[in-house]
Amino acid sequence: MSRWIEIGSTEYTQYANKDKIQAYLTWIGQDLSTIKVEEAFVQYPESKWNTLYKHWAINKVILD
C-alpha cells in the first residue's frame, strides 16, 4: 500500500539523501553490494555526494 510523504519532511529528506549517495557511489564506480548506505554516509562527506549528484543529474538529463 502506498502512502504520501510530504516534501521537505524528515522522511522525504532521508529518501532523497539515500538516492543521492547511491548515485554518487555509482558515479565513482563503487559496487553498491559491497557497502551499506549508512557506511557510505560516514565514509563520504555530504559536500562530495550532494554537489556531485547535482552535477550528475543535470548532465544525465541534458545528455540522455
Image (cartoon, rainbow, N blue to C red):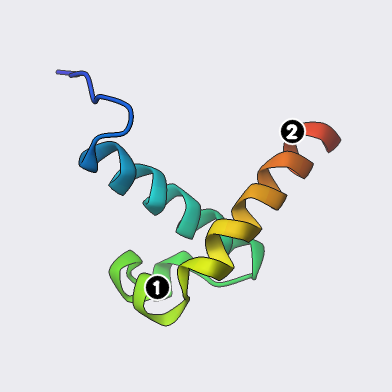
Residue at the outermost right position: 63
* Percent of width and height locating residue 23: 55, 54
Vertical side of 7 occupied by 17: above or below: below
Amino acid type of disc 2? Val
Q: CA distance from mark 1 to mark 2?
A: 25 Å
Mark 1 lies on residue: 40
Residue at the outermost left position: 1
Report the front residue among 11 and 34.
11
At x 55%, y 63%, the residue is 49
Q: Is residue 47 left or right of residue 41?
A: right
Label ID, residue 61: 2
* Percent of width and height locating residue 14: 29, 48
Element marked by disc 1: helix
Report the front residue among 29 and 10.
10
Element marked by disc 2: helix
At x 57%, y 61%, the residue is 24
Few, some or many C-alpha atoms within 10 Å of disc 2 (few <14, some 14-19, many ≥20)? few
At x 42%, y 81%, the residue is 43
* Percent of width and height locating residue 54: 64, 48
Which quadrant would residue 12 be assigned to in this image? top left
Report the front residue among 64 and 50.
50
Quadrant (top left/top right/bottom left/bottom right) for the C terminus: top right
Q: Earlier in the sequence, mark 1 or mark 2?
A: 1
Few, some or many C-alpha atoms within 10 Å of disc 1 (few <14, some 14-19, many ≥20)? some
Quadrant (top left/top right/bottom left/bottom right) for the N terminus: top left
* Percent of width and height locating residue 58: 73, 40
Amino acid type of disc 1? Ala
Q: Is residue 17 left or right of residue 52?
A: left
Q: Is residue 36 left or right of residue 1?
A: right
Vertical side of 6 occupied by 34: above or below: below
Report the front residue among 45 and 18.
45
